[in-house]
Amino acid sequence: SRNWHQNEVLTIDFIVDGPVPGVGSAVHVTTPVAYAHIANTGYQGEVGLLSRNIKVQGAADDSNPIDPDTGSCTGNWHQGTNFLPCPNTYTTGFGGHIMVHSGGKGYVEGVELYRMGQTNILGRYPFHFHVLQNDCSDCYFKGNSIHQSYYRCISIHGTHNTTVSENVAYDVSGYCYYLEDGIEEDNTISFNLAAHIHPVSNIIADAGGGQTITPFSQSVDLILPADVTASGFYLTNLANFIIGNAASGGWAGYALPILHTPLGPHKDLNFRPGNRLTKVFDGNTAHSTGWWWTHAGAIYSGGSLYFTDTDPTLLEYNAGRDQSKGSRSPCLVDKCVTANNCGSYCYEGERAWFKLTNNKVFLTASPGLNSWSGRMEIIHFETHDVSLGLEALESGFAIHDLLVECRSGEEWVMPGNPYDTSADGFFWYDTGQEHIITSATFRNCGARANYDFYDSSPTRGCDTNSVNGCHSGSTVFGLLTHSDQFTPELMQATEGITYENCGRRFKLQDFVDQNAISTVSGRNQNWVDIDGTASGLNEPTLIGSGLSDAGHWWRVEDDVVEDPDGPLTFIRVNNGAERGLGHIRLWWKDQIHNTVGQSACFNGLKNCPAIGRIRHIGSLFDLSNDPTGGLPITANAEVAGLVGGFGWVLQLDDGPPKNLKIDQVEVDSSTPLVLAIPYPAGTSFFITAHAAYCSPTTTHSCTEHFSATESVAHVRHSQGNKYFYDPTTQMLFIRIIQFPQTYAGDNVYSPTAMWHLWDLDTLNTKSWDPRTHALDRFSFNNITLPTFAYGNYLQITADCVEGSISGYCATTPSYVEPQVCPSGYVQVSYDKCCVSPSSTDCYDPTAPPTTSPTESPTFGQFSNLVLNPGFEDGILSPWYANSGTIQIETTEKKSGTQSILCKDRTATWMAPQQSMIGRLEPNATYRISCWAKLKNVASDTLNVSLRIEDDNGPHYKGVSATINNNSWTYVEGDLTVDVTGTLTAVYLYAQGPAIGAEYWVDDFSAVLVP
């Protein structure tokens, strides 16, 4: 800012070569320097030469602005002070300009440009490559100086492959090194200095602590509204070579604004600048910046520039977080070309990352780097004397080789008080993010006072002194916990974390009341500490919330470590056989869940009462041991917790839900997640898995119908399509697995579609789908986090008597704790039974039961082989009528929402039919069944049949039952596919009632008999 800085312009008096050994030369100036300019092992101030032998300058008598700042304006408070440039001043600067255009060539080196640029006049910059396309690829602007510029430094406009290198720019209004329209690519901008940068017309984006800033509109005094965040480098397109530059001062050092469309004469191109991938962004530095907003960042990937909806010629700039026009989605394919829609979704397998390498920032009153949107890989990023190491609100953010030195010991050279500025390392955000950090060092971060659990050194972290102190709430790692609306999934993992002389290491950051009333986000906090270096246990660790009203949800054994700083809970992975993290969302009544963010469970306003509880199964977690009853379930019924144990048990205050949808599943198949729910005796269940955006084919199915099995152990070791109702405990058990978004069965293990366990490395089998893996994920440096898919879900439909409260069973059975330990053992953890709490003689519950499926899927034995068995796909395929008519019915069904009606029958054999070739094996026996009900006659016989074709031609097998028009009848029997020679065809159909009889059928099943 012109109001406060420590830049100095000095005159060289003489130079002495080799004054002492190891020093090339000593520069002597004519006057003493006024300020200390630091050079240490972490960072150094820049020295730039402004004079050149050739000088181009604006007139001395009429170039300078005649409307200077009065110095009397104030704005938002920052670090204890609130000065502000007076807006709409410095508007009249009118210097010289140089433009290369109309097929011209420009080769400029060793030139001084002084009093150049014309404020708010487009195209009138000190130097300007103007719309030369690829016709100036050998052009350059290098080794020059620009100072006292009234409008920018150098503009690259509609021009590619030029070189701007080794220039010095100082005292500049507006963005300095400037990519004008967003289409400029393959230019080299290297080893340049931009220093002492000012907002155009002194209009600046001065903001408080929130994430949003009121947008700025184009005006006479602000031709480019983005100039309210004037910075050293304005990079509207990252497909350039940005190497070795230095930025000092400015709203940020490097502004990476987000453009969804180009500007100027290129605005109608089918092109999205914000998504163009980095060519090289390497070795750049920035400092003495980020003061005007707590989220600015020395490198700022944010701010959206766009034409307004009401006037397509008028620009508007939103400097803050803009989740609509300010989104980036780097992609390996150009969606503008392949989909003719630049905003098309970029799938896993197509995703790319903006790569920033070997960059350094220091003396920054906000994050070293902030990215509101756009996947990034940040490799070797170094920060010193910053408020926050970096800030990233994006799903899929990778960080490796990070150094955050929150305080170096040098004086905090910024306006205001350093103790009003945090010294934070990194913050995990509250929802929809996946971040992986590897090989990171945090030095001198976190508040010192009252935080000595990990380090008792008297110099640890920072104190609140006025020279180089920090805010008393500073922490190395922060986790946002103020929200009941936005809550964490499985989002964060670390490996190779080093703390050097740090104070507070962890903080659950609640901006409302500091966790006096806990929130859903606070209780669900979780973190994968791959090697235990973040927690300090130095062994694989899972980290969960330490808030007391989460009960024993995370405090699952005596061996957990209670961190007092967060508070957090550290759970040792190797204490159990299959430990991991899982996340689900529960949805059972629209009237409840639709209140989230509307009348309950807000983003900050604490009003989200518990309407149930979920806890780990076993007496260790009963009310005598955990009086809270477990983790509260609210209208925002998202749950993140430890999996691989005996399971979770859900109890709702209003009773067992008649219809429960489970979605947003994140869990690895190697760490089973079993869910139990009490239901009254006599309840029957219809449980299905549904894919999204799915049309069934022979190789890919859209639904899976769960079948009953004989024990909880069989559920746990199933492929995730079994359920068990225990009459002793009156409890339903299911295993929840993560399955692909767009199919519920594939042909990985069978020629036709089959459900099975998918893990995070299972490849996608849809050849026309761009996804590489079946399950969405974020993977970096051999660490993989699951990512839930939208639209697919599990559905539990419970057929019980409805009570006075709609949507719930009339009665809730008295709770009977499932017996998780065999005789002679006691439960010592959520996943373990031992002879005694201190014994190492423990029972292994992970061994599969003797009749369980084998570890690799064996389809048919535990899967329903009928495609679209309950007609819930909403289409008939692959069913068809062998004659007569079949149609989808919604008014009459056995379960789910649909059945089919068979009518227009002029023979008894006319029926619905499905080919089972490739799914039924020769000479194997299958339990064949369906449900049926007559429509227009009172009673008749239904035959569920197989037509088998082999070397001897067709023959038939069937099972019959009498059906009626009053209720649904179950028809079941075992049929063997007996084959002579080669099986050439096999069909399943349901026929038999008299000519003219109409009947419904539903819920077909064909399961291999062991």
Image (spheres, rainbow, N blue to C red):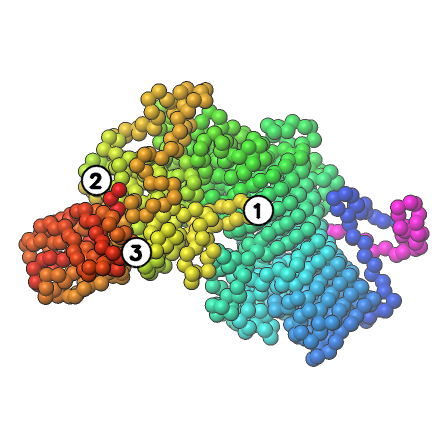
Q: Earlier in the sequence, mark 2 or mark 3?
A: 2
Please tell me whether mark 2 or mark 1 is closer to you in this view: 1
Query: What's the residue at 53%, 30% (across, down)?
Result: 563
Q: Which SS does the magenta portion mostly show?
A: loop
In-image side of 908 versus 105 (left or right): left
Task: Find residue 781 and name its label.
Answer: 1
Q: Which residues are magenta?
A: 1-30
* Frontmost residue, 604 versus 655: 655
Quadrant that contains the C terminus: top left
Q: Position of residue 85 (x, y in %)?
A: 68, 56
Q: In terms of sequence position, does the residue under pointer 2 or pointer 1 come before the other?
A: 2
Q: Which residue is mark 2?
A: 683
Q: Seen from this angle, which residue lies furthest bottom?
A: 102
Instruction: Pick whichever, 884 or 812, lies toward us.
Output: 884
Q: Which residue is mark 3?
A: 918
Comparing 719 with 493, the one in front is 719
Q: Tell me, for residue 521, which label it has, or none.
A: none
Q: Mark 2, mark 3: which one is toward the viewer?
A: 3
